[in-house]
């Protein structure tokens, strides 16, 4: 879980409900309020035990003064039990900066970067805390050169971690990745390095999927133009052969590279996850113009034997674009702009959803000749969601639009975007919308209005089944004045989703549970 964004916390009790014809959610509840004295960065919900829900806050004041606060809440009442700062200066001669924190086996694992002003190396440091926030162990995991980056990936079984190191400035040579496993006891496991099969001019690690019982997969961006070998200069254009997948079987010490390329098409949004059979599912959006647009979806699967089990792509038809543009623009619309891939959600039966969001940002500058002052406004637009559903074999079954229009100014999209929960082979989307929009039919794509600067909001849920969008409506009573911090909510429980609301200096946590 990355340590990100701003927040003060505070809770109070809440009565919440689901509309009679709305999403099938039950047991919505919230805890009493509490306050903090100053704003902090909120990382989100990190885990739960049988009796406790855990969340963390991160605040960086300067290199020596930081706070990483663990908050414990009663899992039944959501009442705050206590708060404890996990951050401490490890060594007075060094700086330590938190990088990642995880919850496994009822312990917390904090990975930090430790560095000195004159040293020519950095250290990856691990601290382990028990469920009460008491440090029970610490150690240096690895030492890195200053031009090396590292990534921490949690095993999907929550039975340890993988440390991947990479020299970010090494060009025109064999690219080497260092691999180091860490058990959830804190002890290190096997260690090795793998080299790219070809000479590369650049390499960036995009994603890592790690299991203790299946091959390791690392998604790389090679970042060169097809046929030229030159580094791309214009980030608004896509490039051919941009993505490559490194698949590594440690038991066989075997590395295989997959060139993720579609003939005459370009990938614009990609994600990957294991399914229940430890096959790797890769899916996302494509286009045919090399612009930041989409006109279809793709999917492929790689088996545990590192063989391709199937690949598919689907080009969107006229009926899909009819959900986004009116009749006057339909003939000229061949692709959709500014669609960002957000989630790949694999369901219990190994079918899956790809979720994207229409996002764009623009800057306005206004000059007043009377005062000779120029004002600048940053506009954030988090708009409609695209849901694409695939069966367990990777065949595209349908795609639909979930209308959403969120426009804010100079707030970094603080209350915008959406969060997602999946249970019982269904998906639930949560975001802020308006009461008027929630009264419209789920297939009414053009009568939705913009929620501007978070005025007159309702916390909304959209329920999506394998056969399509099923319902939409508020999950909190109309007198609720706490806005959802959607991007800070992560699913930490199979059937219950914890949501975070905010108003001024007050905060509220509440939970919703999917009905079977």
Image: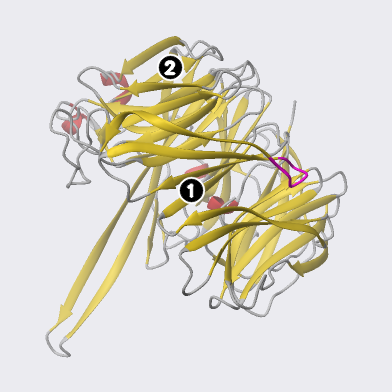
The Cα atoms of the two marked residues, 1 and 2, are separated by: 40 Å
Task: Answer few, some or many: residues within 10 Å of disc 1's Cα (few below 14, many 20 plus, some between 14 and 19).
Answer: few
Picture quadrant where residue 273 is located: top right
Q: Which residue in the structure is indicated by mark 1?
A: 436
Q: Between residue 194 and residue 505, name the one nearer to us.
A: 194
Q: Is-magenta flag for residue 186?
A: yes
In the rendered image, residue 454, in percent from the top left (x then y), is placed at 47, 61
Q: Is residue 313 above or below residue 99?
A: above
| Dot 1: element | helix
Mark 1 vs mark 2: which is more N-terminal?
2
Task: Answer few, some or many: residues within 10 Å of disc 2's Cα (few below 14, many 20 plus, some between 14 and 19).
Answer: many
The rendered magenta stretch, by its main secondary structure, is classed as loop
Residue range highlighted in magenta: 183-188
Mark 1 vs mark 2: give the one in front: 2
Which quadrant, please, contains the C terminus? top right
At a point 47% along the width and 54% down the height, the residue shown is: 416
In the rendered image, residue 164, in percent from the top left (x then y), is placed at 52, 42
Q: Is residue 52 above or below residue 32?
A: above
| Dot 2: element | strand
At a point 37% along the width and 68% down the height, the residue shown is: 410
> Mark 1 touching mark 2, by CB under 8 A?
no
In the image, is 252 to the left or to the right of 368? right
Q: Is residue 334 above or below residue 185?
A: above
Q: Is-magenta flag for residue 340?
A: no
Q: Which residue in the structure is indicated by mark 2?
A: 300
Q: Residue furthest bottom?
A: 371
């Amino acid at each position: 879980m990355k340590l990100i964004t701003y927040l003060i916390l505070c809770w109070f009790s809440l009565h919440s409900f689901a509309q009679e014809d709305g999403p099938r959610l039950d047991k919505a509840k919230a805890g009493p309020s509490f306050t903090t004295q100053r704003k902090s960065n909120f990382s989100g919900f990190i885990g739960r035990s049988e009796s406790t829900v855990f969340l963390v806050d991160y605040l960086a004041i300067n290199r020596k003064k930081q706070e990483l606060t663990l908050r414990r809440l009663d899992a039944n009442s959501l009442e705050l039990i206590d708060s404890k700062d996990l951050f401490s200066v490890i060594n007075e001669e060094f700086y330590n900066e938190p990088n990642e924190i995880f919850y496994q086996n009822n312990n917390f694992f904090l990975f930090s970067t430790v560095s000195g002003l004159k040293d020519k190396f950095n250290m990856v440091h691990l601290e382990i805390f028990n469920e009460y926030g008491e440090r029970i162990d610490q150690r240096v995991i690895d030492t890195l050169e200053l031009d090396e980056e590292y990534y921490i990936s949690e095993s999907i079984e929550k039975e340890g971690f993988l440390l991947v190191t990479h020299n970010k400035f090494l060009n025109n040579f064999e690219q080497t990745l260092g691999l180091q496993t860490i058990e959830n006891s804190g002890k290190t496991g096997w260690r090795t390095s793998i080299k790219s099969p070809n000479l590369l001019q650049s390499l960036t690690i995009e994603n890592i999927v790690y299991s203790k019982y299946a091959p390791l997969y690392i998604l790389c961006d090679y970042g060169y133009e097809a046929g030229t070998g030159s580094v791309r200069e214009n980030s608004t254009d896509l490039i051919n052969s941009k993505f490559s997948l490194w698949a590594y079987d440690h038991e066989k010490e075997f590395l295989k590279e997959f060139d993720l390329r579609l003939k005459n098409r370009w990938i614009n949004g990609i994600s990957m996850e294991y399914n229940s059979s430890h096959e790797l599912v890769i899916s996302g959006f494509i286009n045919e113009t090399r612009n930041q647009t989409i006109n279809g979806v793709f999917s492929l699967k790689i088996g545990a034997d590192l063989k391709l089990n199937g690949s598919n792509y689907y080009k969107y038809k006229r009926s899909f674009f009819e959900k986004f543009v009116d009749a006057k623009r339909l003939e000229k619309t061949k692709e959709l702009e500014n669609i960002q891939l957000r989630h790949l959600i694999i369901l219990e039966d190994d079918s899956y959803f790809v979720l994207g969001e229409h996002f764009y940002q623009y800057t306005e500058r206004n000059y007043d000749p009377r005062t000779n002052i120029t004002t600048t406004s940053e506009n954030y637009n988090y708009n409609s969601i695209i849901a694409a559903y695939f069966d367990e074999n990777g065949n595209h079954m349908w795609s639909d639009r979930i209308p959403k229009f969120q426009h804010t100014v100079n707030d970094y999209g603080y209350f915008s975007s959406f969060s997602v929960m999946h249970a019982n082979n269904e998906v639930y989307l949560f975001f802020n919308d308006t009461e008027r929009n929630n009264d419209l039919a789920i297939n009414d794509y053009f009568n939705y209005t913009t929620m501007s600067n978070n005025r007159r909001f309702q916390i909304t849920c959209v329920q999506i089944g394998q056969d399509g969008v099923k319902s939409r409506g508020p999950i909190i009573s109309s007198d609720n004045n706490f806005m959802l911090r959607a991007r800070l909510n992560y699913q930490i429980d199979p059937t219950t989703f914890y949501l975070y609301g905010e108003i001024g200096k007050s905060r509220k946590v509440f939970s919703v549970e999917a009905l079977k």
